[in-house]
Image (spheres, grey):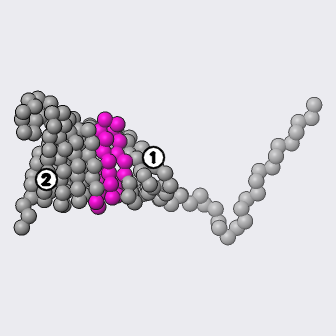
Amino acid sequence: MTSRLRTVLPCLLLCALPLRAAEEASASDTVIESQALDSQSTDTQTLSVFTGNVTVTGNAIRITCDRLDVVSLRSGDKLDTLGKQDRFKSLIATGRVRIVQGDREATCERAEVLPGEDRITLSGRPMVVDHGNNSTATGEPLILYRGDRRVRGSNVRITLPPLKDLGFDKNQPPPAPPAEPAAKQP
């Protein structure tokens, strides 16, 4: 039986996740659970690779994926095994990625989180669903921006709720355009 590793990395996604501004939630620890962990440090950074049923929870967000590569910047005593993890350079989630926060959900094969740039780039058949307004966005790639309800992408398809019925009878011919005003005589 595979044992599950439980690693706590404080405030991992507080500044990293663009799906909803973290101001709405109090800062709390981020918990990463996986079947395996391989972590290696240099004097300046730590690369942690989580594999197998990876789950990240914290600040009202949940991420699941097959693999998560986390690059964090180190400070403090360089001789410490892990050192103090101050800031996160990048998080790359791959394989059946699902990100849920509030009324929004994103799925894809790869999510690249760049906290310094306040954005996440989704690729590999990405889809963003906003259950609050019943909309869906797909494209390749989709780029989400932290703190905004902003999405950019290429080859995008947006599905929105139906337009309101404007009351026209579909069995009647369309109304004639308004007549041009007559020219004034001098």
Q: Is residue 116 magenta?
A: yes
Q: Residue at x 18, y 60 (%)?
A: 52
Along the viewing direction, whichever of 164 and 104 lies nearer the viewer:
104
In magenta, the rendered stretch is 95-122
Asked where in the image residue 40 lies, by quadrant, the reply is top left
Give the residue furthest to the top.
76
Q: Residue at x 59, y 58 (%)?
A: 166
Near mark 2 (Cα within 10 A), the count class, few <14, some 14-19 or many ≥20, is some
The picture places residue 179, in percent across and down from the top left corner, at: 81, 49
The picture places residue 66, in percent across and down from the top left corner, at: 23, 59
Along the viewing direction, whichever of 58 and 90 lies nearer the viewer:
90
Q: Residue at x 34, y 58 (%)?
A: 108
Of tags 1 and 2, which is closer to the observer?
2
The picture places residue 111, in percent across and down from the top left corner, at: 32, 51
What residue would you read off at disc 2? 37
| Image quarter in which the N terminus is found | bottom left
What residue would you read off at disc 1? 152
3 relative position to 14: left or right: left
Q: Which amino acid, by three-letter code, is at mark 2?
A: Leu
The picture places residue 75, in percent across and down from the top left corner, at: 14, 30
